[in-house]
Image: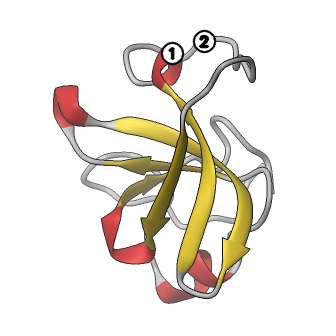
C-alpha cells in the first residue's frame, strides 16, 4: 500500500514540493493535459531540469512501457501535471 497523498481531483499522487523533491531516475511524470499529455520517464536530473524518455503509449491507456526509440524531453517542475507513482513507478 502506498504512503502517497492522492489528489482528489484527478486521482494521481498530489504534486507537492516534497513529492517533487523525491523524484529520481526511473520516476514517471505527466506533462500537459488531455490529448496533449505525455508521460516522461526520468533518466537524469540537472537542478530544476528533468531529462527523460517520452512514452506516448502511456498517454492513451495504461500499457507496457517500451524503451526503444523514445524521444527525449527536457522539462521543469512547473510543467508537471501528474506524478506516475503507484501507476508507472513504485517509489
Foreground residue, 26 or 88?
26
Residue 7 seen in this snapshot: yes
Q: Does the residue at mark 2 contact the one at mark 1 (Cβ under 8 Å)? A: yes
Q: Report the colour scheme.
A: secondary structure
* Residue, disc 2: 63
Task: Pick whichever of labels 2 and 1 is earlier in the sequence.
Answer: 1
The relative height of residue 65 versus residue 8 in the rendered view (above or below) is: above
* Residue, disc 1: 57
In the rendered structure, the answer to whether residue 89 lies left or right of residue 53 reads: right
Could you tell me residue 65's position as x and y percent? 70, 20
In the rendered structure, the answer to whether residue 26 lies left or right of residue 48 reads: right
Q: Residue at x 26, y 47 (%)?
A: 32
Q: Residue at x 67, y 79 (%)?
A: 46
Identify the image quadrant of residue 47. Answer: bottom right
Q: Residue at x 54, y 67 (%)?
A: 5
The nearer-to-camera label among 2 and 1 is: 1
Q: CA distance from mark 2 to mark 1?
A: 7 Å
Q: Which element carries disc 2, helix, strand or loop? A: loop
Q: Across the whole image, how many numbered discs are drawn on residues?
A: 2
Could you tell me residue 62's position as x and y percent? 53, 17
The relative height of residue 80 versus residue 45 in the rendered view (above or below) is: above
The relative height of residue 89 versus residue 35 in the rendered view (above or below) is: below
Identify the image quadrant of residue 34. Answer: top left
Residue 14 seen in this snapshot: no
Q: Residue at x 46, y 22 (%)?
A: 56
Amino acid at each position: 500500500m502506498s504512503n502517497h497523498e492522492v489528489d482528489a481531483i484527478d486521482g494521481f499522487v498530489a504534486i507537492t514540493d516534497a513529492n517533487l523533491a523525491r523524484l529520481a531516475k526511473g520516476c514517471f511524470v505527466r506533462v500537459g493535459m488531455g490529448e496533449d499529455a505525455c508521460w516522461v520517464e526520468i533518466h537524469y536530473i540537472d537542478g530544476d531540469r528533468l531529462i527523460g524518455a517520452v512514452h506516448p503509449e502511456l498517454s492513451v491507456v495504461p500499457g507496457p512501457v517500451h524503451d526503444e526509440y523514445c524521444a527525449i524531453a527536457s522539462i521543469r517542475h512547473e510543467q508537471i501535471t501528474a506524478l506516475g507513482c503507484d501507476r508507472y513507478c513504485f517509489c
